Amino acid sequence: MTSPALELPARATAGPATADRTAAERTTVDRTAADHAAANRLGVGLGWRAEIDTVVERQPGLDWVEVVAENICADHLPESLTVLRARGVTVVPHGVALGLGGADLPDPARLARLAETALALESPLVTEHLAFVRAGGLEAGHLLPVPRTRDSLRVIAENVRIAQDQLPVPLALENIAAQLAWPDDELTEGQFLAELVERTGVRLLIDVANLHTNRVNLGVDPAAELDRLPLEAIAYVHVAGGTLVDGVWHDTHAHPVTEPVLDVLAELCARIAPPGVLLERDAAFPPPTELAGELDAIRRVLEGSTRRMGNLPTRAEPKGTGTERPGGECATGTARARLARRQKELLAALVAGGPVPPGFDPDQVRAQSTGLATKRRDTVAKVVPDLPRLLGPQYGPLFLGYARRHPQTVGYRADARAFAAWALADGGPLAADRRRALEQWLHPAPERPTGPLARLRQALRR
């Protein structure tokens, strides 16, 4: 059996969601959250990926799985997911491309596809991210943080309500990993999420690995952010691995889960028994025994670890108070226009060589820009593996050179073809055999332009 649809209980406290709570109020919230978790338990899960489908099927003690919604078709589900569902394993679709944090209204086609996937999987809920992924005709190819201002809160709340109206099951939003901060944030991430829950009733997917990422990259205290969250709204939790490169933490989902990430999970578990916890792994898949070991480490935390984190560096509190000022918000249409302009400026700096917008940390923007180009390179290689095979060690440097001058505006397959054409025309010297192979890939025999002799033969046949 799949889990029943999860219902969000009424808030246990009155007043602004971001106001500090008394000890009595927090006890009430914790009790409500605990009751909610017990009634809607998902358990311990693993991210389903096509590359490890049989490994996931054979993983002992697995309660549920999560699948990237954009990677499957509702009318043609992978056999592995059908097998798991037949066993009673819950499957939750996890969207990555909706961009509810963007200035545009949610795309009806993307929403419809997400809804169809949830129905096909008989899922108890669907999840997405509090992020923007496109602006001004440019694609980020990744999840980017939203400005935590009253303007963007008004816009995003409307986007969330539109999505909720179109989805057949509850929606939960995930906090993201960030490598840069907006300069004029009025709220912390925890305050922003709490306000969003207060306005829309949306539920939360809390990624403790992303909280750790933001601790390293931005100096944000995970424990303080957890204290600001409406714990009763948590649907489930993500855990994932990453790596530290030149002082920047990269949430790769391709490395083992580290002890500091488990510490953040323990910090959350000291406040609430989460309804579910899921291990994400997207690349560099380890042997099944190693995956099982990471799942067991998560179970040990859930079974009673309440380690507290030590003192952590924090940045200054944002200047917002968490309360609305009468008349302080502009009309939503004007807020959308302002948000669209600011997100376009930032994305142009990240993927199109534009200037760093005023107030942003140039080092953070450079780090995020490099991360986006690297992720784009790796995603194209995964979607079109012929390219790294044909170009060998030249593929990586060539693609990064291409990405610096050519922002992504279309899907990855079209991006791959555009890169191949650029590599042949402007990418610099290529070995003769690699050039020939790339030309044949880009223009298979039926598509190759005909030469003078071929055109003469065709004319004589007429």
Image: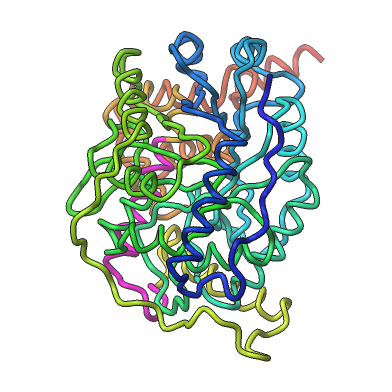
Q: Residue at x 53, y 38 (%)?
A: 275
**In the rendered image of this protein, does residue 147 appear above or below residue 257?**
below
Viewer-proximal residue among 373 and 60: 60
Viewer-proximal residue among 53 and 64: 64
Query: Magenta stretch: residue 373 in it?
Result: yes
Tell me the quarter of the picture where residue 438 sits: top left
- Which residues fall within the magenta stretch? 356-378
**Left or right: 209 as drawn, with respect to 19:** left
Q: Residue at x 40, y 64 (%)?
A: 353
**In the rendered image of this protein, does residue 459 appear above or below residue 241?**
above
Q: Residue at x 33, y 32 (%)?
A: 254
- Image location (x, y in percent) of residue 86: 67, 11
- Image location (x, y in percent) of residue 215: 29, 58
**Left or right: 111 as drawn, with respect to 198:** right
Tell me the quarter of the picture where residue 228 sits: bottom left
Q: Specify the quadrant that holds the N terminus.
A: top right
- Image location (x, y in percent) of residue 361: 31, 72
